[in-house]
Image: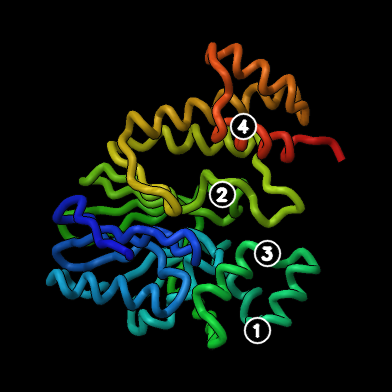
Amino acid sequence: MQTLIKHSERFWYMTPVAHTDRPILGAVIGDTHTLLIDAGNSVAHASTFLIQLQERGLCAPSMVALTHWHWDHIFGLPALEGVVSIASEATKHEMKKLIPYAWDDASLNERVAEGIEIEFCAEAIREEYGDSRDIQIVLPTLTFQESLTLDLGGVHVVLKYVGGDHSKDSIVLYIVEERVLFLGDALYANLYAPTWRMTPEATLRLLDILETFDAQFIVWSHGEMVSREAFAEDCLALRRIATISNDFPGNTEEITRSYATLVNREVNEEEQELITFFVNGTKKT
């Protein structure tokens, strides 16, 4: 059951669904405009969000910003007819590639076999859509390159192109007056690879960018909203593992041993997964 959560009068968000890969969707409520953050993975997903906003008497959206091109963040756009969609130029470029695709089982299986599509995503699409897959790719109305600031009336939102391993077109959104940073999927691993991976260079660069925002609350698209303190702990672990991975590229044992020594305890399951991602991202081929 998805829940619409009120963080403040200005920012609301709807919780994710793991088995169909529905990410968190956000709504920034200004005096003159309402901005949606991401369009969802289907018309049903986007429509559920719109209905929940309407039921709480919130203004209908006039704009939607897309964090990156992946299906679970853009396939709901047909439900937002008349809403201005905003994305980076890189996101629009990647979305254009999806236009010729068919989404039946045979087509999905073929793309998975060719390494174009991910089995995880193919299964989530089947779960979300069932046998009815009338999927339309709607391209963004407006694009930008590096950054864009939106004045919604009483609240401003900064859209910042950041890239990263997960998707090179990723942007983050900073809700200035609320001090909320919406990460999208920017800090997640690259799933469109033979093995899921992260690279030290991209991760450390991205962490440096994210630290420039004076955020008190941070939203992970497939997780939850966390405090500044909790996010700082996540970033510290990422920074430490990325830095050590630079010293011992592709060496699981040395990275694990060095990190365990640094934190003076055994490596936990989440940290071990991150180590595996960095090993995959730095292993010599």
With respect to residue 176, does 266 lie above or below? above
Residue 272's tag is 4
Tell me the SS state at disc 2: loop
Amino acid type of the residue that numbered disc 4 sits on in the rendered structure: Gln
Residue 183 lies, in percent from the top left, at 43, 48
Residue 36's tag is none
Proximity of marks 2 and 4: CB atoms separated by less than 8 Å? no
Residue 119's tag is 3
Query: Label 1 vs label 4: CA separation?
Result: 36 Å
Proximity of marks 1 and 4: CB atoms separated by less than 8 Å? no
Query: Label 3 vs label 4: CA separation?
Result: 23 Å
Residue labelled with disc 1: 104
Looking at the figure, which quarter contains the N terminus? bottom left
Tell me the SS state at disc 3: helix
Residue 169 in view: yes
Q: Earlier in the sequence, mark 3 or mark 4?
A: 3
Proximity of marks 3 and 1: CB atoms separated by less than 8 Å? no
Amino acid type of the residue that numbered disc 2 sits on in the rendered structure: Gly
Amino acid type of the residue that numbered disc 3 sits on in the rendered structure: Glu
Going 65% across and 74% down the picture, which residue do you hit?
97
Q: Quadrant of residue 205?
A: top right
Residue 268 lies, in percent from the top left, at 55, 28
Residue labelled with disc 2: 163
Query: Label 1 vs label 2: CA separation?
Result: 30 Å
Query: Label 2 vs label 4: CA separation?
Result: 24 Å
Label 3 crowding class (10 Å Cα cut-off): few <14, some 14-19, many 20+? some
